[in-house]
Image (spheres, rainbow, N blue to C red):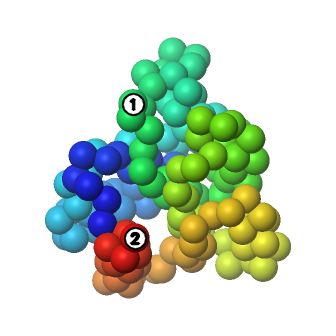
Amino acid sequence: MLDSDVGILLIEDDRVDIMTVQRAFRKNQVSNPLYIARTGVDALNMLKGEDGHEKIDPPPGLILLDLNLPRMSGIEFLENMRADPELQKIRIIVLTSSNEQRDREAAFKYEVDDYIVKPHSFDEFNRVIATVLAFWDSE
């Protein structure tokens, strides 16, 4: 698992999904700092400390990324992030409602660590978070 002082950036525009992630983190006793960006543009600004946003420093160890975002899609975010030498090594897990093969292929083109379709129930969502944590335990 990530050291408890390593931050996690959640890029998600849906308020209910944000609360669900926060609840699942509490249930799984995740104490890492959780940063929240509601758009890809805001996330990039937070990662770089631009446009009036305070820079996340040190950079997060993990990004949980929704693909369906306003202003900049998750794929556009990935393209911008992977082009930046300072950001390209951050681990990314796509956590999205899209089960489209073209979205999966586009995400993996930018070397995401995993692609998870958001489950509909909290119990299933909690299991997804537990799986993500198990992934980090194996690192």
| Residue at (55% x, 58% y) in the render | 92
Front residue of 59 and 20:
59
Q: Position of residue 136 (x, y in %)?
A: 37, 69
29, above or below 15, in the image: below
In the picture, the quarter occupied by the N terminus is bottom left
Query: Which of the two marks, 2 or 1, is nearer to us in this view?
Result: 2
The quarter of the picture where residue 66 lies is bottom right
134 relative to 109 in the view: left or right: left
The quarter of the picture where residue 25 lies is bottom left
Mark 1 secondary-structure assignment: loop
Q: Determine which of the numbered discs, if any, sits on residue 57 in the image.
A: 1
Q: What residue type is labelled 1?
A: Asp
Check disc 1: other Cα within 10 Å, few if <14, some if 14-19, many if 20+: few
Considering every residue shown, the one lying at the far top of the view is 52
Q: Where is residue 135 in the image (x, y as percent from the top left)?
A: 40, 75
Q: Name the residue under label 2.
A: 139
62 relative to 88 in the view: left or right: left
| Residue at (68% x, 78% y) in the render | 99
